[in-house]
Image: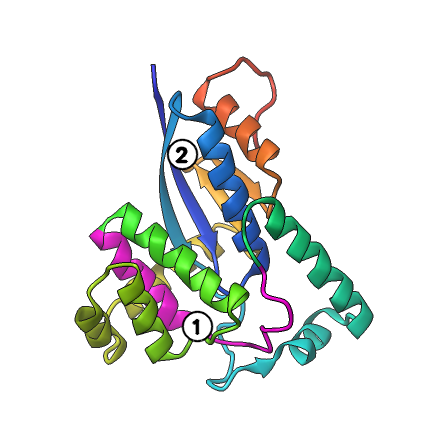
Amino acid sequence: MTAHLQIDFVSDVSCPWCAIGLGALETALARVAPEVQAELRFQPFELNPRMVPEGQDIEEHIREKYGSSPEQQAQMREMIRQRGAAVGFEFGIGLRKRIYNTFDAHRLLHWAELQGAAQQRALKKALLAAYFTKGENPSDHELLLRVVGEVGLDVARAREILASDEYAAETRSREKLYTDAGIHSVPAIIINNQHLISGGQPAEVFERALRQIAGAQPSATAVA
């Protein structure tokens, strides 16, 4: 019998560990198929909801937020690059200079979900690649429209959304839902509205959790 799971992937398109976590989760899902099938939905979270429109130099931002030195930042970037490569995600070297607000990207992801899970997933992955692989600005409307077109969604409709406040209330409501539930860092992967896996875990962690939750293998260990 095939077990069916619902997975809510709470994340931001400017979060490197979200790109790593998604790659690892997709690897795990491929390993457990066809015995375990999952409906994957992407939920909004803003790492920097009050970021100024022009963004901020990323090294300055990380230094202010975490107190890390340039050497520590370089070491972390290399670790992130290696972890990404292990799950098939490419982090562009030296291309990501600034960090930006991502609220409009989340509005489009909300709209894309209404078009179908596959469309939302394609847009999410394309936005992650635009920022982390190519170093592009995920708050720029022209970039957002180009990515929408590249994944086969309606560019004219996306332009209407960006020119208005459409889906803003819905996106804010979902953000609040998860922060009120205690989620203050991402990625946060919620399975069947009950089981939480935090962080960009290795594929093996996701695979083990998926099998346990689906009942594909006996285990006395619960995912908390």
Tell me if 85 is positioned left or right of 128 in this view. Answer: right
Please, what is the three-letter code of the amino acid marked with disc 1?
Answer: Pro
What residue sits 77% from the left and 72% below the top?
67
| Location of residue 107 with respect to 122 vertically, above or below | below
Please, what is the three-letter code of the amino acid marked with disc 2?
Answer: Asn
| Location of residue 198 with respect to 11 vertically, above or below | above
Viewer-side residue, 216 vs 213: 216
Q: State whether residue 85 appears in this view.
A: yes
Viewer-side residue, 56 vs 180: 56
Find the distance from the CA under tag 2 to the CA under tag 1: 30 Å
Q: Residue furthest bottom?
A: 54
The residue where tag 1 is placed is 138
Q: Considering the image in quadrants, where does the C terminus appear?
A: top right
Tell me if 111 is positioned left or right of 68 in this view. Answer: left
Query: At which x and y percent is residue 207?
Result: 54, 30
Q: Nearer the viewer, mark 2 or mark 1?
A: 1
Q: Which residues are magenta?
A: 91-115
Q: State whether residue 69 appears in this view.
A: no
**Which element carries disc 1, helix, strand or loop?**
loop
Q: Earlier in the sequence, mark 2 or mark 1?
A: 1
Q: Which mark is residue 192?
A: 2
What residue sits 41% from the left and 44% below the top?
8
| Location of residue 119 with respect to 143 vertically, above or below | above
